[in-house]
Image: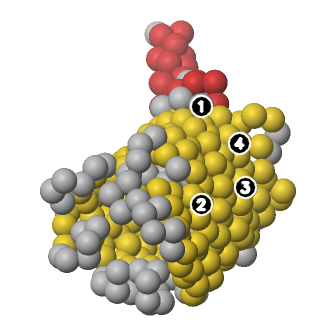
Amino acid sequence: MKATRLTLGFCLCMSLFAAEAPAPATPELAADKAEKAEKPDKSRYNLFNPVPKDQMREMDLDRPDKTNSPTTIDAGHFQLESTLAEYFRERDAASHTRTAGWDFGLPNMRLGVLNDLELNTSLNYCYTEERTVDGATGQVSHQRGLGDTVVGGKYNFFGNDGEDHLLKTALAIQPQFKIPTAHDGLGNGKPELLAIIPFSLTLPKEFSLALQPTPGWERSSANTGYVTSFQSTVELSHPLVKNLDAYVEHWFRVTTEKHQKGQNTLDFGTIYHLTHNLTVDTAVNLGLNQASRRVEWITGVTLRF
């Protein structure tokens, strides 16, 4: 009887110990805890309570390509992206004119307001100089001055934070409203609206795929009224060497305007990361049809504060 009581007591003690002891950690549970530990809660940060530097995202740009990033600027931080110089050539078959020109200083100023929200304002160019030749008459005209102003913002739906991993996705919406501030002859003098929707997908072997549908409300080519427009890009990017990324991109734009051809370009570019907060870039965009600019060359810089 005594042995039986000792046996029952031993079993009871072991049962209590087992109930209080933590369950052994499985690899899945450990990975989940590690991921949560690496992803701090940044929702409490805002414009007046900036994200600490050790919790900031990797620097991501909306230039020099036409495809924007779905990632927003960290709350309380500021990023200046600017084209230093841009050269372009285009030809209008209908009017028999050829135009070439230089644009200088196309700044885009981005400000992180909340963890998933940023505001931005940009100038289409601080200064431009264009030379147009009329093929029928040989007459040459020049245009100089400032460009239009664009204001807007970006809201990230998902994919803003966390480490990059295979098939990671991110999606945002980025409304942009154009205020007509360009000098006469350099703009249409009317407001316009775009709704940019950038999306990204991380692929194997360090490749990244980006898509960007963009519906818009813009002026017609003759500036006689408003038409609905649609732009879209498909971009594939990959690191070339340490700190140097490259991309190839296809862009097209169509409108509801009658007898107006769509535009198509094939774009190439590189981005070099000098530091965690400073990059330089260059790009070449090639027109694929007569409705597009024949060639564009761009170089610029991005600085984050």
Residue at mark 4 to residue at mark 1: CA–CA distance: 10 Å
Circle nearer the N terminus (2, 3)? 2
The answer to which of marks 4 and 2 sits earlier in the sequence is 2
Task: Name the residue: 42% across, 73% down.
Answer: 153
Q: What residue type is disc 4 on?
A: Asp
Is residue 142 shown above or below 168? below
Q: Earlier in the sequence, mark 3 or mark 4?
A: 4
Quadrant including the C terminus: bottom right
Res 52 quadrant in image? bottom right
Disc 4 and disc 2: Cα gap in Å? 24 Å
Q: Residue at x 65, y 62 (%)?
A: 87
Viewer-side residue, 59 vs 217: 217
Crowd tier of the residue under label 4, counting other residues whose Cα lies within 10 Å: few below 14, some 14–19, many 20 or above: some
- Disc 2 vs disc 3: Cβ atoms closer than 8 Å? no
Q: Is residue 11 left or right of residue 258?
A: right
* Residue 281 image label: 3
User: In screen coordinates, is 254 left or right of 133?
Assistant: left
**x and y percentages locating residue 147 in the rendered image:** 51, 82
Whether residue 61 is visible: no
166 in relation to 257, above or below: above
How far, Cα to Cα, is label 2 from label 3? Answer: 17 Å
Q: From the image, tell me which residue sits under label 2.
A: 88
Q: Which residue is mark 1?
A: 207
Nearest to N terminus: mark 4 or mark 1: 1
56 or 69: nearer the viewer: 69
Residue 24 image position (x, y, % from top left): 58, 26
Q: Secondary structure at mark 1?
A: loop
Q: Are marks 1 and 2 in contact (CB under 8 Å)?
A: no
Mark 4 = which residue?
A: 245
Q: Position of residue 169 (x, y in %)?
A: 45, 41
Specify the quadrant of the image occupied by residue 224.
Answer: bottom left
The residue tagged with tag 2: helix, strand or loop? strand
